[in-house]
Image (cartoon, grey):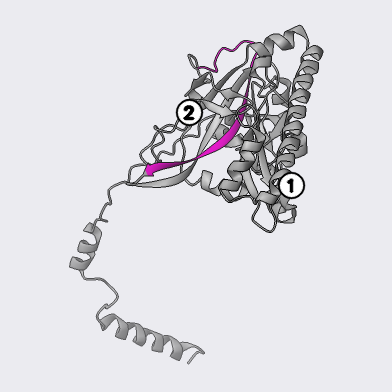
Amino acid sequence: MRKGAKRKVSQREDNKENSTKPDNHKEHPSKATTRSKRVKASHPESEPEYLEEPRNLEDLWKAAFPVGTEWDQLDAVYRFKWDFSNLEQAFEEGGKLFGIGNNKVYLFGGTEPQQVPFKGKLEIVYIPIVVAVVSPCPPSDKIGIKSVQRETEEIVPMKEMKMDWVPYIPLDKRDRQVVEYGRKSPQIFVLGCTQRRAALKHMKIDRLKKFDYCLPYLMPIKEEELELSTEVDILFPAEPNPPVYCVFDWQFDEVEEFADDRIKEEELSADQKDAFMEFVKEKVRQQKRENREKKEARRQAFEKMSVEAKAAFENLKYYKFYPVQKADTPDISAVKASYINRYYNKAHEVL
């Protein structure tokens, strides 16, 4: 026998044996048919989501720093989703801030804490406001610092409080080079602040409190608009008793009678009367001196102004914007007011 013959015979026998076995690997015809007819269940197609495109001036109101708001209350200002679409629409055709010629718009923010209804109960809410000043040049580069708690008023450069007028760039222009946009004269400026909140913990208390009492300053256009107060805040150290706090108006009050009233109210002892009267007189002299300095400062500032600048100041317009009422924001309709601050006084229009 040739080599390999036995192996070939054996292989033939194995093949014959395998051919007689049932083919277990083939699927049953009925099963195959069923599987081929099975159709995958279709799911209803979900409707595509459409994201609302951001508006060009959507964040304009937030870009204007809320001057004079306590640092620890800033988060409370943005607690609600306030809607300032009225401010945005003012820049559109037919709006108050559209077609203003060679003028520009200078915006500064602020807050007005008010008790207003929200979801069936009254709440103290920090309502944001935005003031728009229409002018060919910045209305001022100064900030006023004044409150009931502060004895004196300060008028300081904005930069001392890390504030300045900065150009606002609309959303659709932000993907361009800043230099390219800068070649075109910006039409909107906001009063911004570069003070970092993280650095506040290292700040002295007196410096920190100055930010709470800041007010955008505007030099009085007419002398009769110059606020020359006849009131002085009195904080007399009546040791060992608590300090005597009161307000003296030299236009209506008489010093000795005023002191006697404090004694009757048991705020002041009789042996402190003379010292108290001298304290009040000195405060009055100080306030009168400040009034004279204000008048002189205003006179000098106007003398240095060009004719064009004087005309611009005489034609200034300011508009005060409140948020638009929405279902998810407090009802502020009853607390809207035209008053801005001690320097700007009242807005020409409230929107």
Question: Is label 1 in a helix, a strand or a loop?
Answer: helix
Mark 1 / mark 2, whichever is N-terminal:
1
Say what amino acid the circle numbered 1 marks: Arg
Say what amino acid the circle numbered 2 marks: Ala
What residue range appears in magenta?
96-117
- Please say whether residue 41 is visible from this viewpoint: yes
The outermost residue toward the left is: 30
Q: Which mark is residue 184?
A: none
Horizontal and vertical percent for residue 246? 61, 42
Q: Residue at x 49, y 88 (%)?
A: 4
- Please say whether residue 177 is visible from this viewpoint: no
Secondary structure mainly formed by the magenta segment: strand
Q: On screen, 97 above or below 1?
A: above
Q: Which mark is residue 207?
A: 1
Q: In the depicted view, which residue is nearer to us: 100 or 124?
A: 124
Question: Is 111 colored magenta in this rendering?
Answer: yes
Q: On screen, 268 above or below 228?
A: below
Residue position for label 2: 337
The outermost residue toward the top is: 307
Q: Is residue 195 left or right of residue 251?
A: right
Q: Residue at x 29, y 80 (%)?
A: 19
Q: On screen, 165 above or below 46?
A: above
User: Label 1 neighbourhood size at 10 Å, few (<14), some (14-19), many (20+)?
Assistant: few
